[in-house]
Image: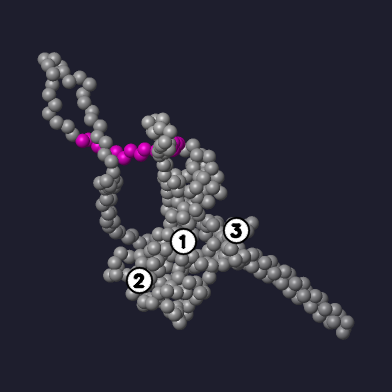
Amino acid sequence: MVNTSSNHENQSLEEQLDYSNQQNKELSEQVKVLTEQVRHLTKLLYGAKTEKSKYNAPDGQTSLFDDDSTFTDSEQTEEQSQQTISYTVVRQVQKKRNDSLRADVEVEVIHHHPENTNCTCCNRQMVEIGGTMVREEATFIPAKMRKVQHVEHAYECKNCKGDAFQPAQIERGKAPQPVIQRSIASPSVLAKVIYDKFMQYVPLYRQVKEWERYGLNTNDKNLSNWVIRTSHDWLLPIYDHMKHKMMSKSILHVDETHGQIINRSDGKSGQSNAYNWVYRTVPCQGPTIVLFQSALSRARSVLKSFIEDYSGTIVCDGYSAYDKIEG
């Protein structure tokens, strides 16, 4: 009798153990799936990316974010289905599209005259009584490449050449110096490269194809060198002059914001923060000057390197780097 009771208890404990093991297995699978979802969503939110990614749900699962009807169809109860709701929709008058050209755009007027100006009744010459502008349109003239060759001509005085006591008199024309030495880039080409990169956000490697269509064979390395040389040789002196003017003002606004640089010179990850410092004068002290300073850190030394000679008042936030700045 005792053995029978013990066997029954052992069997019951084995069944409970099997049930617990099965339940533990199912819970482990759920934890695994939820952990993978959290990892994927965390990567979408905080991971490195250049474009928005779309979440792909695991096999056999639906995505809450891909179903457009999830929150659009309201639940109908029996009481709601028997109600009749009436309302008045006030339609906004759609504004007429107003495309226009600036006043300084070059104007070309095309006159359209009748092919035959003889009267169809008496065959006499008709007289113009007026004209009406029926429409105007915007015409785009595509850019084109032109090869400009600079030729320096030399002139010699033949009269002095025949005089043995006079040195040869030769005058030679002087071509203007190029923007970049030993480069075919003209100011117009450099201006477009810089404009497309910084104003139109077109990377240099994509500009290469466009320049090839125009007839200029180059590569992104050359374009990069052009931008660097132009900035250093021509724009940096302007920047320094503006900074000199800025340091003479009595009030200066300063702030900084973070960003990211993919290829950092300090070896840190591209996900590390870099900073852009902005310095601005006030309008009441003459033309407003705004200058930017890029740096890999937010350290006080970056700020001091810019305003080390400044003795005026700095308007800033409560960031500790602004404390104890000695002009």
* Figure quadrant of the N terminus: bottom right
Please identify, in this view, whether the residue under mark 2 or under mark 1 is nearer the observer. 2
User: Does the residue at mark 2 contact the one at mark 1 (Cβ under 8 Å)?
Assistant: no
- Between residues 318 and 227, which one lies in front from this camera angle? 227
CA distance separating discs 2 and 1: 60 Å
Label 1 sits on residue: 71
Magenta residues: mostly which secondary structure? loop
Q: Earlier in the sequence, mark 2 or mark 1?
A: 1
Q: Disc 3 on helix, strand or loop?
A: loop
Residue 296 is situated, as x and y percent measured from the top left of the image, at: 53, 67
Q: State whether residue 199 is above or below residue 164.
A: below
Label 2 sits on residue: 248
Q: Residues within 10 Å of mark 2 (few under 14, many from 20)?
A: few
Range shown magenta:
133-153
- Find residue 57 and name its label: 3
Circle count:
3
The residue located at (44%, 46%) in the rendering is: 177
Please identify, in this view, whether the residue under mark 2 or under mark 3 is nearer the observer. 2
Instruction: Evaluate whether residue 144 shows in this view.
Output: no
Residue 98 is situated, as x and y percent measured from the top left of the image, at: 27, 47
- Between residues 121 and 95, which one lies in front from this camera angle? 121
Amino acid type, residue under disc 2 in the picture: Ser
Residue 196 is situated, as x and y percent measured from the top left of the image, at: 44, 49
Q: State whether residue 324 is above or below residue 188.
A: below
Amino acid type, residue under disc 1 in the picture: Phe
Q: Quadrant of residue 278?
A: bottom left
Q: Earlier in the sequence, mark 3 or mark 1?
A: 3
* Figure quadrant of the C terminus: bottom left
- Residue 317: in magenta span: no
